Amino acid sequence: MKIALVTGGSRGIGRATAILLAQQGYAVGVNYLSNATAAQSVVDDIAKMGGKAIALQADIADEAQVVAMFARLGDELGPLTALVNNAGILFQQSTIENLSAERINKVLSTNVTGYFLCCREAVKIMSHRHGGKGGAIVNVSSAGARLGSPGEYVDYAASKGAVDTLTTGLSLEVAAYGIRVNGVRPGCIYTEIHASGGEAGRVDRLKTHLPMQRGGQPEEVAQAIFWLLSDSASYVTGSFIELSGGK
């Protein structure tokens, strides 16, 4: 059986991805930070479909918690074959004058260091160098990595630029060892993360500025993630799929 870990899997893009992967025959580890009820509801939805999933609490910015999460995943589901790095944080919309070092470092710790740590542990399991059977990683970036999110989340956008560089570099580092690494760059997607920035209706405000004139749905991003993980993308690595409505 294919085994997937989806970080930030209790809501939004992570939830949609976990459910889709389960529908496609994966056993899924649903990582969450603090909302155990939301994570368990994803696990329950998967169980109702006849799938297999477990909820895994861990702060991916904490190295010891990441190591423990991967150990538990292996013990309860089996050797990892697919990693979706999706967990991410942002804070209140702000220009750079009001950014503190504490805020910047919190964003980078989760959105960058967390991705690195999860990739590290996944490579240890999947790589042919370590006796693994190979696998695939998809890093969830953002259109902000290209656009910069001026006046709103320059720190978040910068963290996603780092994710893009990680994706490119790691894809080259592990390509010969049976691991593919790709990224997706969602744009204005209807998820709860916008409320964290203080504007729950942000997508509706911006959608008319998009060529497609609408916001995206988490399920649309999940479909791209699933394809990149699947055998249909077996010759794809170091690539990015834009999911930003044309912008």
Image (cartoon, rainbow, N blue to C red):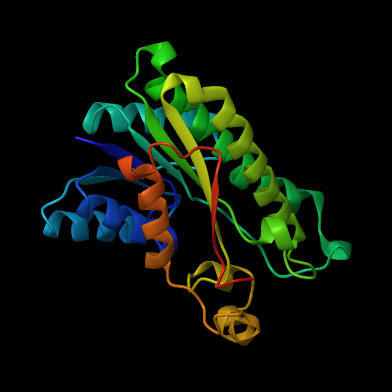
Front-most of 227 and 114? 227
Q: Quadrant of the N terminus?
A: top left
Q: Is residue 202 left or right of residue 153?
A: left
Q: Is residue 111 left or right of residue 7?
A: right
Residue 237 visible at all: yes
Q: Quadrant of the C terminus?
A: bottom right
- Extreme-right residue of the structure: 97
User: What residue is at 44 percent from the left and 52 percent from the top?
Assistant: 8
Front-most of 141 and 46? 141
Q: Position of residue 200 (x, y in %)?
A: 56, 79
The image quadrant of residue 126 is top left
- Extreme-front residue of the structure: 235
Q: Position of residue 195 (x, y in %)?
A: 56, 73
User: What residue is at 41 percent from the left and 35 percent from the top?
Assistant: 136
The image quadrant of residue 45 is bottom left
User: What residue is at 33 percent from the left and 55 percent from the top?
Assistant: 39
Figure check: 91 above or below 87 = below
Residue 35 visible at all: no
User: What residue is at 74 percent from the left and 55 percent from the top?
Assistant: 155
Q: Position of residue 134 (x, y in %)?
A: 36, 25
Q: How many marks?
A: 0
The image quadrant of residue 93 is bottom right
Q: Position of residue 120 (x, y in %)?
A: 51, 27
